[in-house]
Image (cartoon, rainbow, N blue to C red):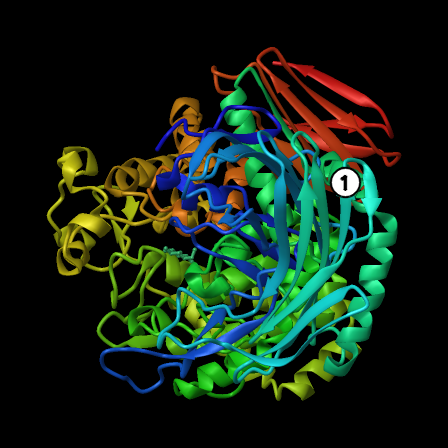
Amino acid sequence: MKDYFKVDEWKIVEEGFDPHYNKVAESVFSLGNGRMGQRANFEEAYSGETLQGNYVAGVYYPDKTRVGWWKNGYPEYFAKVLNAANWIGIDVWIGNEQLDLAKGEVISFSRELNMKEGYLKRSFRAKTAGGKEVEVVATRFCSMVDDECGAIKYTITPLNFDDIITITPFIDGDIANKDSNYDEKFWDEVQKGIAEGISSVQLRTKKTGFEVLTAMKCVLFNGDTQVDYQSTPILKEKYVATEIKVDAQQGEPVTLIKYAVNLSSQNYKAEELAARATALLAAISAKGFDTMLAEQAAAWAEKWKHNDIIIEGDAKAQQGIRFNIFQLNQTYTGEDDRLNIGPKGFTGEKYGGSTYWDTEAYCVPFYLATAEQKVARNLLLYRYKQLGKAIENAKLLGFKNGAALYPMVTMDGTECHNEWEITFEEIHRNGAIAFAIYNYVRYTGNEAYLADYGLEVLIAISRFWSQRITFSEDKQQYVMLGVTGPNEYENNVNNNWYTSTIAVWCMKYTLEVIGKVKHTDPAKYDALATKIAFDEATETGRFADIIAKMYFPHDEKLGIYLQQDGYLDKEQILVKDLPKSELPLVKKWSWDRILRSIYIKQADVLQGLYFFEEDYDLDTIRRNYDFYEPRTVHESSLSPCVHAILAAKLGDVERAYQFYLRTSRLDIDDYNDDTDDGCHITSMAGTWMAIVEGFGGMRVKDDMLSFNPLLPGEWKALSFQIGFRGSLLNIRIAHDGVTVKNLSEKAITVLLNGDSQLVSGNGEVLVNV
Ligand code: BGC
């Protein structure tokens, strides 16, 4: 449903309550702080349609794989991010009627996500079946400052009665995942208790043995005055609550402040969780809700300083991009190299909350430019630490000698995906991991990373390619058989141009880095070569031979690269000539029909031309773009952004703008009718790329930032912040000129439309166009 939320540059606003749209709203209003997150479920009971979701980063369950026909090499399990204890719950009874917006009457309702300051506020007036009217205002947040903590302020005012209101704040760990293969519950109770004003439940995950302690402390106010209260403890399996009865008077607000913490045994010994929770709750309740909220606003102000994007003259686009940036910052903060970015972040269970190639291909550029170096570095280290598992994974499939195949889907490095055409064949993901290393070093200039970590990963990946690629006697060239490219609408194809291209690029880059590290740090190189038993002459010889003799499918007549062998044999009916009623194909066509068609799910050849644009002239990029885009259905949310960037590069601002619009409000406007089960977090990074790399034309060239801006006619101006090697820049692109402001002390030289411009510390350069 489009236009459901109100347009506001800093907020997402829902006015009026539509129960049919509730699950979409729950996704869109999700909160998170990198360490934990949750969907925007109501605090009080709700018996209508809802998808309950509370998540603790890095806590997962290995749900035994369920497939129709088991194949050797399949992973044992699919890791699932766990729906964890619900800490937001506050049950409310008015007299003897339970407050539930699915029952009684909702007189007014509004929900607002304040992206500037990082909180969610919900206000409503409701009438119970018995005619009692109340007003409720609930504000809550996941603290960016105390990232294991959250707080809720819940105010209820009787509007037309005096009566006993029973307020029961609770923690409920008796939780199931919607997405579970065998309808099991994944948590066991370790302990629970209520003592000295603190209620807690400690749970342990089955199989993985993560322990999470969720605890709360509540404070009550009559009007503005804090009051002591009597409560009745309620303890059930995996559940604790304190029932508070308030003699409420008409027109007098009663406020409950609920402080909560989620502590995980990933970070502390399990037996220490309870004491830590007590200390943390004491600390945050002493700070108080208002101070916590003020700190939250300050933490967000600091984030926005580094990564806000301003689109002048288009409030919808403005709201869209801020929403994307907000969600990315809620999902990953880069504090912990064991954590990563699930395609749905903390907004839903789909995709298991696991790590995909999305991180390297789409998210790394965002964090590189908008956060401290350590954030992107931690994303890289996540893969470095999982190298052993990637080597094991390749070994299971028959590869040897330290060849690594990173998983398509993972939590801890083990492959989780269980469709053979993806698990075994969508191996291009290995290339994205190598490309992220290249991207990181290119952006930060931190070459030491290569000797310390990067080269080891690169050699292991290149070893994999050199074994996966085989020699065709017929062609007298190397070929790569049986793969799935980024276009998952075709499987088991031979010589997917993108996969072969990135594989060869990996080997070239590995050779280059070997040369570099040998030169700059011979001792580290020797130590690494010994550690991994690297037979340099033979192995690099094979890499070089493959590089020289790789086969890449192309068509002379059309002057394009072929997505794979045989692509042109297919019936060539363009997407525009398909009846609209047949789209999206994934919902309307049989899988068999999709596989045999020309239709492309997401950028494939074009993904390669985007990554390696410097190796191709503009005409080649244009010919391929003009050929493939009309055959692309963009049924992955990762697709439009790459097309937006390429369209901008080709100077087609109108097409770039159209693609941009499809990404930026994808979830706010629920374009694909699928936001109910979570937001498309990783594609939000693609939206950022479409702005900065597309309209800003930003690239790194020869250790410098380079901009070739192109502004959509619909916008008055566009500006964004970029951090680069110690400088913080604000780039403002207007129709008559581009301004580069240096917000830091450190002078920097940038390229603007190819000309170099020195921007002194705190200085500014204006170039008319
Ligand atoms: C896309 C993949 C992506 C995955 C998770 C799929 O629909 O085709 O490229 O990695 O979603 O976002």
Residue at the (58%, 77%) spot, across then down: 387
Check mark 1 vs ligand 1: CB closer than 8 Å? yes or no. no
Q: Residue at x 13, y 44 (%)?
A: 572
In the displayed structure, 457 sits above or below 25; it is below
Q: Which of the 4 image quadrants contains residue 467?
A: bottom left
Quarter holding ligand 1: bottom left
The amino acid pointed to by label 1 is: Asn
Left or right of 272: which side holds 516? left
For the C terminus, the quadrant is top right
Element at label 1: strand
For residue 213, side relative to residue 575 (left or right): right
Judge the density around disc 1: few (<14), some (14-19), many (≥20) Cα neighbours within 10 Å.
some
Left or right of residue 145, residue 17 in this image: left
Where does label 1 land, which residue?
A: 222
Q: Position of residue 605 (x, y in %)?
A: 35, 50
Residue 679 at x, y percent in the picture: 47, 47
**Image quarter hosting the N terminus:** top left
Image coords of residue 695 (percent x, y) = 53, 28
- 650 or 263: which is nearer to us? 263
> Is the residue 644 above or below the residue 55 in the image?
above
